[in-house]
Image (tube, rainbow, N blue to C red):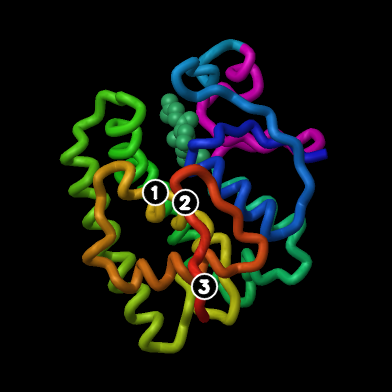
């Protein structure tokens, strides 16, 4: 059975849990106490993944760190519909990859601000917030243009992709790093759409969609 080295409060772990749930994949959790025990920096975990970062997925012989790589693997291996990691054209595939990279930039900005605020990490929080707002503005404008073209998701198509799942957690958790989404209406509408995808699950700090369309 698939194992996920997981920490409940990690947004990068949450994105993997989200896709596992949306794909209906059974798995077991191996809890790694990120804070305050810092088990991800201790020998037992470093033997699994020398990077010392969460999440890590184990599927048979495969041990895979990095949440974006894990999303790509799970979608390629287990999504029979092919919609989560579409290969319909080189352009579409490249755009999914581009947003996966954007999600990693959210980790080093919005997530870093949250780590500084909530987990006492010694980061320059104002600088992290400034970089996060720059990314949020880019995302909001992209989503506004997508909506104008009758597109609901980051990448054109009728269905969400792993790009949406990768970017969602550190957007929806942004207030925990002191980053308001007040000025980003298209982002707010997009997060609401994600919450309505079948199989959506929450984590602490993330709430289900309210009643409505
Ligand atoms: N690019 C990696 C980043 C993973 C990452 O930064 N994970 C955090 C927890 S959310 C971590 O383990 N940080 C520890 C560290 O960087 O030392 C991914 O997307 O999985």
Confirm or deny contact between disc 2 and disc 1 (CB under 8 A).
yes
Q: Nearer the viewer, residue 119 or 62?
A: 119
Q: Nearer the viewer, residue 212 or 8?
A: 212
Q: Position of residue 17 (x, y in %)?
A: 62, 47
Q: Position of residue 92 (x, y in %)?
A: 53, 73
Count of numbered tags = 3
Task: Find residue 31 and report its image quarter.
Answer: top right
**Residue to which mark 3 is pinned:** 211
User: Magenta segment range?
Assistant: 44-66
**Residue to which mark 2 is pinned:** 206
Q: Which mark is residue 111?
A: none
The residue that appears at 28% across and 65% down in the rendered structure is 138
Image: 140 above or below 122: below
Task: Find residue 76 and report its image quarter.
Answer: bottom right
Mark 1 nearby-residue class (10 Å; few <14, some 14–19, many ≥20)? many
Is 46 included in the stretch rendered in magenta?
yes
Which residue of the protein is positioned furthest toward the bottom in this rendering?
A: 149
Q: Which mark is residue 173?
A: 1
Task: Find residue 6 and report its image quarter.
Answer: top right
Sooner in the amino-acid sequence: mark 2 or mark 1: 1
Determine whether the residue tagged by mark 2 lies in a helix, strand or loop: loop
Image: 87 above or below 204: below
Q: Position of residue 80 (x, y in %)?
A: 78, 66
């Amino acid at each position: 059975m698939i194992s996920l080295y997981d920490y409940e409060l990690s947004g990068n772990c949450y994105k993997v849990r989200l896709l596992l749930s949306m794909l209906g994949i059974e798995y077991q959790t191996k809890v790694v106490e990120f804070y305050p025990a810092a088990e991800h920096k201790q020998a037992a975990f470093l033997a699994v993944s020398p990077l010392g970062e969460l999440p890590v997925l184990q599927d048979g012989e495969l041990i895979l760190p990095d949440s974006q790589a894990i999303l790509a693997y799970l979608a390629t291996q287990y999504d029979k519909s092919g919609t989560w990691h579409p290969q319909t054209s080189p352009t579409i595939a490249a755009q999914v990859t581009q947003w996966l990279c954007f999600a990693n930039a959210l980790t080093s900005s919005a997530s870093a601000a949250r780590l500084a605020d909530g987990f006492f990490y010694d980061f320059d929080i104002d600088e992290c917030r400034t970089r996060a707002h720059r990314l949020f503005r880019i995302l909001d404008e992209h989503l506004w243009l997508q909506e104008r073209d009758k597109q609901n998701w980051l990448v054109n198509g009728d269905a969400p992709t792993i790009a949406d799942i990768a970017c969602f957690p550190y957007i929806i958790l942004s207030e925990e790093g002191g980053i308001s989404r007040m000025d980003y209406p298209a982002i707010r509408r997009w997060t609401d759409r994600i919450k309505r995808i079948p199989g959506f699950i929450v984590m602490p700090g993330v709430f289900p969609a309210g009643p409505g369309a």
